[in-house]
Amino acid sequence: MNPAPRMWPDISGIAYGGDYTPEQWPREVWDEDVRLMQEAGVDLVTVGIFSWALLETSEGVFDFGWLDDLLDLLHANGIRVDLGTPTASPPAWFFARHPDARVIDRDGTVMGFGARGMASHSSPAYRAAIVRIATELARRYGDHPAVVLWHVHNEYGVPVGEDYSEQSVQAWRGWLRERYGTLDALNAAWGTAFWGQHYGEWDHVGAPAAAPSVVNPAQRLDFHRFTDHQLLQCFIAERDAIRAHAGQPITTNFMANQSWTTDMWAWAREVDVVADDHYLWAADPEGEIGLAIAADLTRSVGGGAPWILMEHSTSAVNWQPRNVAKRPGEMARNSLTHVARGADAVLFFQWRASRSGAEKFHSAMLPHAGTSSRVWREVVDLGGKLDRLDEITGSRVVADVAILWDFESFWAQDLEWRPSVDVTHAAQIRCFYEQLWRDNVTVDFALPGHDLSGYRLVIAPAQYLLSTADADNLNRYVESGGTLVVSFFSAIVDENDAVHEGGFAAPLEPALGVRVEEFLPLREGDSARLTWGGSEVSSRAWQEDVVVTTAEVIARYADGPGEGGAAITRNRHGAGTGWYVSTRLEADGVRALLAEAYRDAGVEAPDHPAGLEVVRRRGADADYLIAINHRDTSARLAADGVELLSGATVDGEHDVEAGGIAVLRTATPSVQGGDRPADVNP
Ligand code: GLA
């Protein structure tokens, strides 16, 4: 299946701006806003996201006067509008009228009013109300010249994802009937013979609410799928209501870095253009790596097409335990890293800091300190920088390595009662990605069922849930010449969270030449050593008892419960190679492992100084090298071309200043990495 055709909002160059909530301010402030937006080079603002109570003052009674004025004002000043539907925060009258539309959490708490968060995704009253307001907005503004994009809802899945209300449970039973057809099929898929959970009537099947012990994991996995499905149906209902009256592209904002409640691959097929919100985790000392992962994932789910950075922050957020402010230059580095990894729009939450409410300590483009502030000066400077990068829009990131990222595997793996709490899917992805990042090897993400033939190297970190069909796809990938690196705790269960027949990892035996007999998790804090050639490397958390069938043993456990057993193996299968690593390697081990895999795959790691992050975007007539210097000293980039931010000609080398950025237009190399089909997202 091809990805949906992508549409781009009608703006030239890299779009710049943010969420704009003028309803929180007196009318005279709006004039100052547009003047300052022009000063900063802002050309796109998102409005209306939380304005339902002001737009529909009671059921079916609308007041669009203030929004008419606002859109006209923005249009008159050359600022385009991403028009939000306000359905992430229904008004008080809605809940008063439809109390049964309130969400109930897993513990049975009924969610009250006074914060934000949608009503039950399965409530017929909520579905009717969202279609009504989306239709009215599209009818009224479908032809408004300021509106270039529609922004449905806000961040589906947070703060409301799973819902245990009666309406949700009814819908869940319908979804299960659709999926399984018969109760026999459901009982088999969920393995209900275990703990006597057999169902004899559909009405007895409940949501996996809090229970005395661990709830059936297959039921929980399905409830996750159901929740994602219901949320997506809410999006589709609004999208189609808008489409009936408006022709602009339609999107919603994903959260590649924060919440994996929704399956971004499936959602990306439903939007016209992919958009993401990104916030650094202050507790992560290398937040720029998490940022790069999120950006690469966002680009990948959209099949490589340019995407919109819908929100990020100019400085601190307000919702983490310690909200660390960005230091000078960091906002620009963050922004340009998103651009380097495929974003053609840089937007923030939010334009002007709110004086009241739960987010008053969140940074903004225009902070409480006003225009005589560092943040404002950097916002104006960033607008200027982006203006000089118009020509890179539409170019595409080049990657010939893929990491598998499957949301279903996340949902299944991170449930309770797994062999070790020290093994999570996200941490394993990060562990491999970090080394690729340090090696400046650009990565796409992919599903295990995708056509992977365009990638030289594919990495499967703790791909716990892997269907037999997807395992066959990976086996074929290796057979026809690919290099595959698989980490421990992969190919353990099928799509019903049932252990594969034949044992752990058995579906990948053709590619890997091993099976796993037993998991050997380590105690908290314990580490173990591996003998690898003449040297030793460390690992932690996990070992396995690996049965080697056709693979060559590359490293063995020097100690720990698996002492003497195979730790790392390499297997020739057809024209390709399958690596298996049965432990959680420390950084030096990952580096050594990937160096070997690069060799097998013919991947070349560019020789840039450590701490200089460099990504290549390929345009029709040139390549663009975007270099972000994370060091506090300057770093030398070897290249020829023109540095677009300064206009300087670069002949052989360019010094990127400490904490600085460079964007070079350079010739497309004659031997090109990333020669692969344009779209790998089926
Ligand atoms: C999310 C929301 C915004 C705002 C920011 C704060 O991304 O979409 O409305 O709450 O978080 O960081």
Image (cartoon, rainbow, N blue to C red):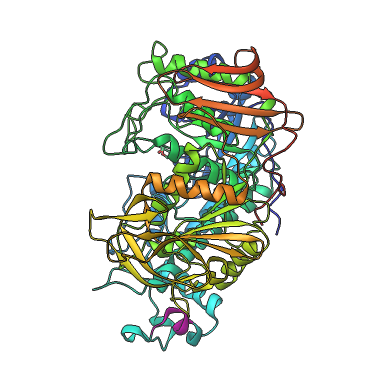
Q: Please state which of residues 148 and 575 is positioned toward the viewer in this rendering.
A: 575
Q: Please state which of residues 445 and 478 is positioned toward the viewer in this rendering.
A: 478
Q: Please state which of residues 61 and 425 is positioned toward the viewer in this rendering.
A: 425
Residue 642: in magenta span = no
Q: Quadrant of residue 288?
A: top left
From this view, report whether residue 76 is shown above or below residue 670. above
Q: Position of residue 161 (x, y in %)?
A: 41, 56
Q: Quadrant of ligand 1?
A: top left
From this view, report whether residue 137 is shown above or below residue 204. above
Q: Quadrant of the C terminus?
A: bottom right
* SS assignment for the magenta stretch, majority: helix
Q: Is residue 419 visible?
A: no
Q: Position of residue 226 (x, y in %)?
A: 48, 66
Q: Is residue 374 visible?
A: yes
Q: Position of residue 93 (x, y in %)?
A: 40, 49
Q: Position of residue 108 (x, y in %)?
A: 28, 64
Q: Please state which of residues 630 and 322 is positioned toward the viewer in this rendering.
A: 630
Residue lying at 71% horizontally and 47% vertically, measured from the top left: 678
Q: Quadrant of the N terminus?
A: bottom right
Q: Is residue 652 left or right of residue 65?
A: right
What range is drawn magenta here? 186-192
Report how many numbered discs are placed on residues in the image.
0
Residue 190: in magenta span = yes
